[in-house]
């Protein structure tokens, strides 16, 4: 008998799921990463540090994602919002003579001022008005623990970055199989207050569709994060 699935509903005005970002340019993948989902669950549990053993039990667990956009009026084509680019100045406006303000100014690894001054420009990209159903497979007891943690999270839950605040309860229950979990997701999407339609789904492994490699399976969190690759298939809605 296969293990059950935990259904997560990730919906917000803005989401950001980084997978290959540098300091000055923070991109977002089109859908939630496995590392992002497991990081969110760690926040719910209040689990800090490396979490090596905990992450190991989820490394090969199945995770299916389905993306939803708002349904247009009858007869209108379904469209999605473009990526939002947000411009930031990091480290500007601080007095380097003030000991406390000086801590907020970016520096080199040896504590010296960075080349070209303390202020740095960064560009951050966000998904707009998207919703995702994420089905994560795992042991029944573990999934029930996560369900309770999502109801009363230890730390704040955000969808990628701290300004990406969810607008719906994330935990949507544990289901005996993938079909039951995704059927519930379709019911949520089709409800009157959501009125959303699916535009693509992401399956773990290689299937018929666009196969891509992601470096998003976390081996170790904490100060020195480690990841490994996995293959996923993106299948557009027919």
Image: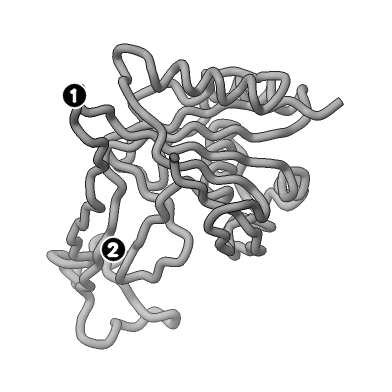
Front residue of 51/201: it is 201
Rendered position, 173 above or below 89: above
Snapshot quadrant of residue 27: bottom left
Residue 104 disc label: 2
Calculate the distance from the C-alpha at mark 2 to the C-alpha at mark 1. 48 Å
Would residue 213 be found to the left or right of residue 67 on screen? right
Please give left or right for residue 230 compared with residue 84 in the image.
right
Q: Where 114 falls versus 151 (above or below)?
A: below
Residue placed at 53% from the left, 29% from the top? 8
Q: Quadrant of residue 217?
A: bottom right
Which quadrant would the C terminus be assigned to in this image?
A: top left
Q: Position of residue 197 (x, y in %)?
A: 36, 29
Q: Quadrant of the N terminus?
A: top right
Task: Indicate the secondary structure of the residue bearing disc 1.
Answer: loop
* Nearer to me, 166 or 205: 205
Q: Is residue 169 above or below residue 27?
A: above
Image point (23%, 62%), residue name: 101
Q: Position of residue 80 (x, y in %)?
A: 26, 42
Residue 220: % across, % down? 66, 57
- In the rendered image, residue 28, in percent from the top left (x then y), is placed at 38, 56
Determine if residue 43 is in view.
yes
**Can you say whether 116 is above or below 142 in the image?**
below
Q: Is residue 2 left or right of residue 227?
A: right
Q: In this view, does 56 lie to the left or right of 10?
A: right
Mark earlier in primary sequence (2, 1): 1
Residue most extreme to the right: 1
Residue picked out by circle 1: 73
Q: What element carries label 2?
A: loop
Q: Tell me the residue at 21%/71% (across/down).
A: 121
């Amino acid at each position: 008998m296969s293990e059950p699935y935990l259904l997560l509903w990730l919906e917000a005005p803005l989401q950001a799921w980084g997978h290959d970002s540098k300091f000055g340019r923070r991109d977002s993948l089109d859908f939630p990463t496995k590392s992002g989902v497991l990081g969110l669950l760690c926040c719910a549990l209040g689990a800090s540090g490396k979490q090596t053993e905990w992450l190991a039990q989820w490394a090969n667990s199945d995770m299916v994602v389905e993306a939803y956009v708002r349904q247009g009026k009858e007869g209108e084509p379904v469209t999605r919002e473009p990526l939002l680019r947000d411009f930031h100045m990091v480290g500007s406006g601080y007095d380097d003579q003030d000991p406390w303000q000086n801590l907020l100014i970016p520096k080199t690894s040896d504590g010296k001022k960075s080349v070209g001054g303390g202020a740095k420009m960064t560009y951050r990209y966000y998904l707009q008005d998207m919703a995702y159903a994420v089905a994560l497979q795992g042991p029944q007891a573990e999934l029930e623990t996560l369900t309770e943690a999502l109801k009363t999270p230890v730390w704040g839950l955000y969808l990628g970055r701290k300004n990406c605040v969810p607008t719906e309860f994330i935990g949507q229950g544990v289901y005996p199989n993938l079909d039951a979990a995704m059927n519930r997701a379709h019911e949520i999407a089709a409800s009157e207050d959501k009125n959303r339609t699916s535009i693509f789904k992401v399956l773990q492994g290689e299937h018929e569709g666009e196969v891509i490699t992601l470096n998003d399976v976390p081996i170790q969190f904490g100060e020195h994060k480690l990841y490994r690759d996995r293959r996923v298939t993106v299948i557009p809605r027919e």
